[in-house]
Structure formats: C-alpha cells, structure tokens
C-alpha cells in the first residue's frame, strides 16, 4: 500500500499527475529512514532534515509532525507482515501540481507520497566490503538539500555498475566529495577523514552518528577536503548511509585499499553502530 496525496493506493494502482512539478522539474524533497525491528530509527533527525530541505527550496509543509508520524505508522501497519521486521521508509513531497511553467504560484499545494517496504540489513557488504571506482562529480551545487534532483548521482552509480564495480566515489577536479548515494570516510593512521558538511555533500544522518560514535571511541575525526591520491593511499575506506549503514570499500579502480580486507577501525565503528540502533 502507498500513501499518495491523501489516498491509500494499492501497488500498481497509483497514478502520477502529469504536471506535478516533481515529475516535470524534480521540484521536491524526500527522506529515507530505516525501520529496525519495527521501530523507526532516528525519526526526529529525518524529520528535522525534511523540514530543512523544505525551507531551503522555499516550500511550506502543510502537515504537522504528528500528522506525518500518523501516516508513517499507518504505512507500517499496512505493509509489514509483523511489527518486528527490518524495513525502509520513503517519503517524497513535491511542490505540487500546476500548468507546466518554470515559476510557480505561492498558493500551490504540496503533494506527499510515501511507502514502506521490508529491507534486510546489508550484512554481506558490511562484513566483506565492496568495490568502487572514481567518477567525476557532475551534480548541482546544492547537494546539502535532499531534493529529487538525483540524475547526476544515478548516472555515476550506473557508470560504476556497468564497469564492474559496486558503486562510485565522486570527485570534483580531484577533490573527493562522497559516494553516489552515501557519505565517504577515509582512515589514515587511525584517524577518520571526511569532507566537511558544505553545500557539496549531503549532511548525512548516519554520517553525523558515525562521527559521534568515533569520538566516543576516542578516534580523531578531521572534516577536511582530501584528494584522490590521499584516498588511494588510505588504510581503510567506508561509506555511511541510512540503508548502507557502515559499508567498507576494499578496493578502488582495482587497487586494494590497505590490506584489501575490512579494517579494524571499520569493525569497531560497526560494533558501536549495532549497539546504537539497539538502544
């Protein structure tokens, strides 16, 4: 069951509005949240980011926090066979429907679409690591807003997969930003390095959680830009994200990172993350 503009719709029966600005212009925002054992993980943080994204694109949300939570909880009841499974929640809000034009009126009504589906944790990738390739970052300059403008990221991911890699690591003129759909960390001499939370990367919720967990473990974190050469010489690499969690990268463009196996810093962080989501 999907929630589409105030209606409950069965899969295969949902219809889009041809002149929805999200469909025509990518004019909208979204959030993806994790559900662990039937409980929404970090809902408050996702809600805060949803509201920030709306503010950044000049969209006023007509739903209260309680109304959004009611919709999400109803989605879980309608779509999950039991209330103790792992799942993923997707919420999308477009600016609304009007005759196609680049500008829009101030009284346009936003449209909310959402779904919940079962999704197991990516344990295999977390335990064994994945491969990546460097791809030029061609996305727009407001990657900090979680909008529907994802074509650049999708093209990067597709390029990586078609060339035999699991994912892409994006860079702007040799300066590393993040993954196609995840934030990126490098480990060098026991220190975490990651791109600062500027307009060039998404301000990831899992990213912030991992930084906090690292600090709790006494691991130094440096939020500074680094280049592709530093990345290739790092001891460990990993992605962070809502659905990827903490995912090690064992090789880039066919070259092993560190020992070519999941490193000890990543393992410590994964263990701390497991405890965090169980709290």
Image (tube, rainbow, N blue to C red):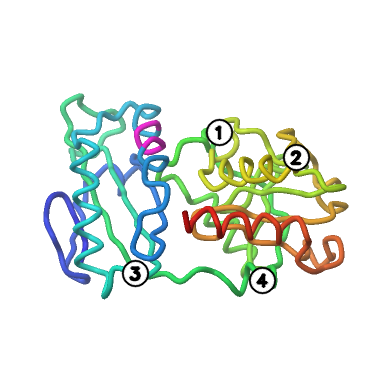
Closest to the camera, between mark 4 and mark 2, is 4
What residue is pinned by disc 3? 84
Alpha-carbon distance for marks 1 and 3?
A: 40 Å
Farthest residue, direction front:
279
> Is 135 displayed left or right of 57 in the figure?
right
Which x, y percent locates residue 221? 73, 38
For label 4, the SS is helix
Q: Looking at the picture, does residue 180 appear above or below residue 207?
A: below
User: Hey, which quadrant is residue 271 in on the image?
Assistant: bottom right
What residue is pinned by disc 4? 127
For label 3, the SS is loop
* First reached walking from the N terminus: tag 2 or tag 1: 1
Task: Read off the magenta span.
Answer: 48-52
> Is 259 displayed left or right of 136 in the figure?
right
What residue is pinned by disc 2? 175
Question: At 24% from the left edge and 69% from the top edge, which residue is drawn?
Answer: 79
């Amino acid at each position: 069951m999907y929630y589409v503009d105030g209606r409950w719709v069965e899969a295969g029966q949902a219809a889009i509005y041809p002149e929805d600005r999200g469909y025509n212009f990518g004019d909208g925002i979204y959030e993806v949240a994790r559900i662990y054992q039937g409980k929404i993980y970090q809902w408050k943080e996702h809600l805060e980011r949803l509201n920030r994204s709306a503010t950044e694109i000049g969209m006023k949300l007509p739903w209260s926090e309680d109304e959004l939570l009611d919709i999400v909880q109803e989605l879980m009841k309608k779509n999950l066979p039991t209330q103790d499974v792992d799942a993923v929640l997707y919420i999308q809000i477009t600016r609304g429907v009007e005759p196609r034009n680049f500008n829009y009126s101030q009284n346009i009504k936003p449209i909310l679409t959402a779904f919940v589906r079962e999704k197991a944790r990516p344990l295999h990738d977390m335990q064994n690591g994945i491969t990546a390739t460097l791809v030029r970052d061609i996305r727009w300059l407001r990657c900090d807003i979680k909008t529907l403008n994802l074509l650049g990221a999708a093209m990067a991911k597709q390029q990586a997969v078609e060339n035999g890699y699991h994912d892409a690591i994006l860079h702007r003129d040799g300066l590393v930003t993040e993954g196609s759909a995840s934030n990126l960390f490098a480990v060098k001499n026991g220190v975490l390095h990651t791109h600062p939370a500027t307009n060039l990367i998404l301000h990831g919720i899992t990213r912030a959680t991992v930084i906090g967990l690292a600090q709790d473990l006494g691991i130094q974190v440096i939020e500074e830009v680094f280049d592709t050469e530093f990345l290739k010489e790092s001891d460990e690499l990993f992605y962070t994200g809502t659905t990827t969690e903490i995912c090690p990268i064992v090789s880039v463009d066919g070259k092993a990172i560190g020992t070519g196996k999941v490193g000890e810093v990543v393992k410590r962080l994964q263990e701390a993350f497991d405890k965090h989501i169980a709290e």
